[in-house]
Amino acid sequence: MGSLISILIIVVSVLLILVVLVQNSKGGGLASSFSSSNQVMGVRKTADFLEKATWTLAATLLVLCVISTSFNKTTSGVTDGTGVESVSRKKAADDTAPPAEKTEAPATPAPVSPAPTN
């Protein structure tokens, strides 16, 4: 189900990009090349349709992104080793670990070589 939501997010994103590019901006946009469609529906109706399509696709994208977060939750509440929560849990686990055993120094000291003379 999570992969289906991801595919829908990609499709809606591409459609939103296309609708935004087609809109008639101050510079003319890509909508100026579709003058024949403006004659059929009228300029104002085309702008209204594109604006409604933009808002609808943006809202759909928002809803799909919120829904997709429910598929990314883990059941145990522990993340996969990334993020602030897991780092703080690792640090807390290290703090509660028993201290390592102390090793004693060797009984005989290491031999010291004399310094070279110049």
Image (spheres, rainbow, N blue to C red):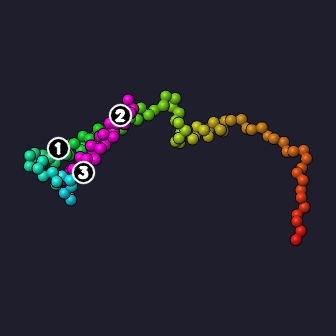
The magenta stretch spans residue 27: no
* Relative horizontal placement of residue 97, taking residue 18 as reference (left or right): right
| Dot 3 and dot 2 residues touching (CB under 8 Å) | no
Q: Which mark is residue 5?
A: 2
Q: Position of residue 76 (x, y in %)?
A: 52, 29
User: Which quadrant: the N terminus?
Assistant: top left
**Element at badge 3?**
helix
- Label tally: 3
First along the sequence among labels 3 and 2: 2
Q: Alpha carbon of mark 1 to alpha carbon of mark 3: how far?
A: 14 Å
Amino acid residing under circle 3: Leu
Question: The residue under label 2 is which amino acid type?
Answer: Ile
Point 35% across, 34% down: residue: 5
Give whichever of discs 1 and 2 has the lower sequence position.
2
Instruction: Name the spot of residue 21 as percent of width and height, x first.
Output: 24, 51
Residue 15 painted magenta:
yes
Disc 3 and disc 2: Cα gap in Å? 24 Å
Q: Which residues are magenta?
A: 1-24
17 relative to 98 in the view: left or right: left
Secondary structure found at label 1? helix
Identify the residue at image location x=90%, y=61%.
114
Residue 76, placed above or below residue 21: above
The residue beneath circle 3 is 21
Q: Quadrant of residue 12?
A: top left
x, y (%) of residue 99? 73, 38
Badge 2 element: helix
Residue 23: horizontal and vertical position, in percent? 20, 50
Point out which mark residue 49 bears: 1
